[in-house]
Amino acid sequence: MPRVKVSVIVPVYNTGKYVDECAPSLLEQSLPADEYEVIYVDDGSTDDTLARLERIAAEHPNVQVHTQPNSGWPGAPRNLGMRHAKGEYVQFVDHDDQLGHEALERLYEHAKRNDADVVLGKMSSTMVRPRRVFRHTVDACTIENDELMQSMSPHKMFRRAFIEEHGLRFPEGPWIMEDLLFVSAAYLKAQRVSILADYPCYYWLKREDGGNNTQHRFDPQHGFWPNLRTIVRQIKDGTTPSDDIDALQNRLLHRLYHVEILSRAREPEILREDPAHQRPRFETARQLALEEVPPAVREGLPGVSRVRADLLERGDFDGAVAFAEHVRAVQARGELGEPRWEDGCLVADVRLSLVRGDGEPLTLVDRDGTWYLDPRLLDGVPGAEDGWEVRDPFRLAYAELVVKDRDREDWWYPEGDLSVALEPLGEGRSRLVASGSLRLDPERLAGGRPLERGPHEVWAFVHVLGIDRMVRMTSDGIENAPAASPALTGGRLALPYWTAGRGQLTLDVGPRLRKLGPDTADAAATNAARGTHSLPLPYIAATASASPAPVKLTVATLTVTAELAPAPDGTTAELRLPPRLKLRSGRHPVTLPKTDTPIAYAVVRNGTLLRLEGPAYKATTGRRLLDTITDDPRVRRVRRRLGGRD
């Protein structure tokens, strides 16, 4: 009997219909069913969840169901699942999420190939923005790769022997942030951590009822602060203290400080919550920061974050609110050059910057060689009347482009990096600008594979001075229109366009939403009649390796499937119609779906396509005219007199 390679552990409680939505992704894995097991642990559900689980187990030999009295949190069910697991590796899955079809097979192979203790599989989510830890596949790294701290959920694959060797367990009972405690302990102990970024392994999807929204996790009444203190101390105990802001301990604590502590002093939370509730949170966060977080962590923050931290440490709640109001109004502005096709890639120049609420650039001011934060951000902030020094404008600054598969919630990173630089604005003022190029390859972007069929949106993420923003890459007032020439790539049409409403650059591959539009007629009209069965269409960019792409057309009243194929010139595509058409002899307009303007004319005789002509060609005299009328004896006699042949 094959050994069990992976044990999938799923804690459940009052899951209802979400059990049935998650189950197919677990039970239809590409890994053979006898090589993995699914272990459901019901945490005392009071609805029909247990009955649903038992039906699934009755139909699938590799599924087992265990029950326990309600513990109030996923930790105890996960621990019980680990006690029953037989797999070489364990993969934790929440009951309302899903796995990619090849997730277990790919994760296991990646783990074995690299002898990994922990494997992070690429996550696709409607819950959080994309994480750059999944930008590249990594064979092996350690906790020294502090990007690991971007991914603290338990939805990973762990070597079971590694878990047992170090006694790793989730805290039990209603213990908020149990995943952070478990995962940070694993990172600290792991000798080799691998990252699989070229395949979407885990889909963390927001429920319709909002039941798995992470914003509900913050609950001071159930141990949030003492639990956070425990996690901070675990990291401090596992690393060496240092005054160096870039030392490992300080880099690891930066994530906890920024996300879990400083959130209480910044937007959106400090502006969203009732001050009567937020002030106590603010004060408790201040106390924890002063008692547990080394000064070097705060010293290593970028400019805006250091203002927040200073206000928190001083206990200035009102000042933090005033500062948060200014920062909340800051937006990212993306400038996109005209998209174009180069070597099979959609290419455009990119610039990103931040602007204040009044639409003016967010600036830094140079005073005798020292940079100071934009004074407008500091209006009404106590202690900042003389300005706020920014010691390193580039501290932790970066920007990147991301492409979202709208149908599947997958995020992909196109080639190339954006560089951040200071751009002078005059009078001692400068702004931080990220610039570079978008290079979107439809045939390789999805982890080295072609993009799936459907629309793919272009976004950018920018993080400068401690301000982070996601921004849609849009046009300058253009909506619902082509953004560049269609392309023929990999045997499919790829149509770049600006979306309706937002004007966001999007590439429809397949295509699914867009169609070749009537604007193609203007380009096709430049073609002279060639006397052949194909017609070059200069508006289409074709890669040398492209295969013919099917396209639906109407010839007169007949709907046919034609082909677009690379033309000999290597830069255009040719339209090819079937050689036999059930039409009367004559010259018939060729149109695209839902359009009236012909992109070509098909000359047909006795059901056979003689040639395609561009719309600019007017067949009104001579032999071309005779080709378009009925082939009867009188016509043949006229043709013989003109020197033609039957």
Image (cartoon, helix red, strand yellow):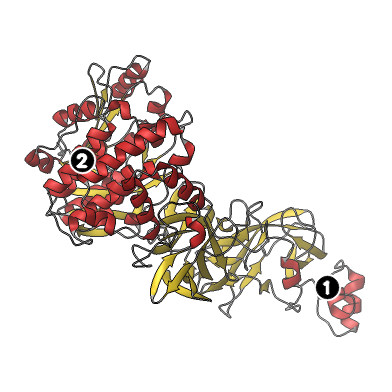
Q: Is residue 191 left or right of residue 296?
A: left
121 or 598, nearer to the observer: 121
Which residue: 37% across, 65% down? 390
For label 2, the residue is 231
Secondary structure at numbered mark 1: helix
Residue 120 in sight from this viewpoint = yes
State left or right for residue 314 relative to residue 463: left
Residue drawn at 28 percent across, 31 percent down: 10
Left or right of 498 in this view: 400: left
Q: Position of residue 582 (x, y in %)?
A: 75, 56
Three-letter amino acid code at disc 2? Ile
Quadrant including the N terminus: top left
Residue 87 drawn at (x, y percent):
16, 37
Q: CA distance from mark 2 to mark 1?
A: 84 Å
Q: Is residue 457 left or right of residue 68?
A: right
Give 314 or 571, whichever is nearer the viewer: 314
> Is 258 rendered above or below residue 46?
below
- Say which quadrant the C terminus sits in: bottom right
Q: Quadrant of residue 147?
A: bottom left
Residue 644 is marked as none
For residue 627, the mark is: 1
Q: Would you call the spot at circle 1 few (<14 residues within 10 Å), some (14-19), or many (20 or more)?
A: many
Of marks 2 and 1, the one in the foreground:
2
